[in-house]
Amino acid sequence: SGDVLVANDTRVIHARLRGIRHRGDAEAHIELLLHKPMPDPGHWQAFARPAKRLKPGETVECVEGLKAHIVSRDGGEVVVRLEAAGQTLDEAIASAGEMPLPPYIEGKRKADAQDEEDYQTVFAQADGSVAAPTAGLHFTDRVLQSLADKGISQEAVTLHVGAGTFLPVKSDTLAGHKMHSEWGEVT
């Protein structure tokens, strides 16, 4: 009694976009994983597969009328400007995108509708993560009620899980590992 459970209330967005890049008669199937919104409205940093097929100025046409215009490319990362016809950009991403599942899940089976619920924590409120904060996945409403019954209160912080969660450490030293920033808020 008197303890406080502090949990991350981030919510996983439909950050995986699949589309087609047309170049003359040639088509390439492209996957974009949005991982960080940029200050310019509609601009996102994203991982692209296959990135080598993309050039600045090209457009990836996704479903639901969502278009991703390639602004720049640096290796496997691109900056895209997203354009949605007839709906807000957030609605278009939610409609056209897919929830990105980690390789240890997606590598074993195809994503299904149940993942929409199972890959969110019970704390999920603030849209913005590209992966679930997995330390919170084992909590249930029943567990939270049990804690509350014992006098344990709950507070929330927001930390949107970003690109760093997808990048393996390839360096022998921490100083040699490229870290990505993540957006957080403590109220």
Image: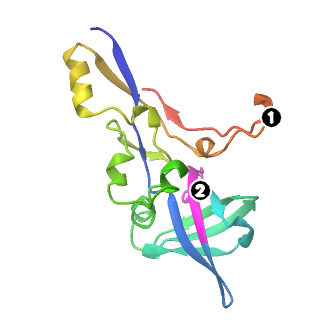
- Circles 2 and 1, Cβ within 8 Å, touching? The answer is no
Residue shown at the point (49%, 71%) measured from the top left: 66
Residue farthest front in this picture: 108
Which region of the structure is painted magenta?
30-44
Viewer-closest of 138 and 79: 138
Q: Residue 168: give x, y in percent of width and height.
A: 68, 42
Quarter that holds the N terminus: top left
Q: Nearer the viewer, residue 180 or 108?
A: 108
Which quadrant of the figure has residue 132?
top left
Q: Which residue is mark 2?
A: 44
Q: Main secondary structure of the magenta part?
A: strand
Which numbered disc, 2 or 1, marks the residue that appears first in the sequence? 2
Q: Work out whether 11 lies above or below 173.
A: below
Instruction: Note whether residue 55 is visible.
Output: no
| Local crowd size for mark 2, using a 10 Å CA cut-off: few (<14), some (14–19), many (≥20) | many
Q: Nearer the viewer, residue 164 or 114?
A: 114
The residue sitting at the left extreme is 149
Q: Is residue 76 visible?
A: yes
Which residue carries the number 1 mark? 176
Residue 70 screen position, x and y as percent: 66, 68
Q: Give the residue displayed 34% in from the left and 35% down from the top.
A: 123
